[in-house]
Amino acid sequence: MPDPIQGFDVSVMVIGQNGPEMAGEYQELEFSIKNDTEEYLELGERIARILDGEVKIEGKLKRGWTSLDIVNQVFGASTLRRGERVPQSPRFVITCSVDAPEKGLQGRYKFEQAVIPELSISVSQGKGVAKKDLSFKAEGFAAA
């Protein structure tokens, strides 16, 4: 049985309209692909038929906070105020590469037309790293 993939076998890159964005190493990537199924109960049946529904691709990137320009990078504007026009959210390509040939695992996951609808920053006292979480939703997924 091969060893599982470890954190140093994986790298994550975020590409925006101007090339690599939010560069640096990410501490964590999690994602989910959900088929929001619907139940269809036919007349005289007690067991529902399961119909395919809307497919949702979502995830989260985590790492240390490294830039004061993060609001501009995520939302396309450095100032967000009521009464002012907020631009369309930037679109990103998020690539997760696995490079562990000794474990028989090499490949790439690519999330296309990703939007980051939520930015969370956590700061606490002491020597701990200020953390930044980037939730994302994507319009496409490809495994290569």
Image (cartoon, rainbow, N blue to C red):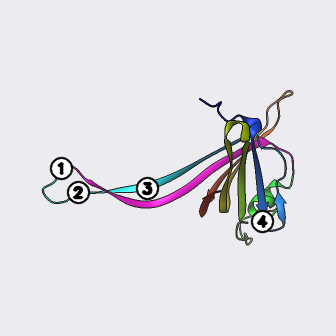
Q: How many marks?
A: 4
Residue where numbered disc 2 is placed: 41
User: What are the residue bounds of the magenta stretch?
Assistant: 47-66
Residue where numbered disc 4 is placed: 76
Is 55 colored magenta in this rendering? yes
- The crowd level at tag 1 (other Cα within 10 Å; few <14, some 14-19, many 20+) is few
| Res. 17 image quadrant | bottom right
Q: Amino acid at mark 3?
A: Asp
Magenta span: predominant SS is strand
For the residue labelled by badge 1, is the local secondary structure a helix, a strand or a loop? loop
For the residue labelled by badge 4, is the local secondary structure a helix, a strand or a loop? loop
Label 3 and label 1: CA atoms lie apart by 21 Å
Q: Which of disc 2 and disc 4 is earlier in sequence?
A: 2
For this orientation, the residue located farthest to the top is 126
Q: Which mark is residue 36?
A: 3
Q: Which of disc 4 and disc 3 is earlier in sequence?
A: 3
Residue where numbered disc 1 is placed: 46
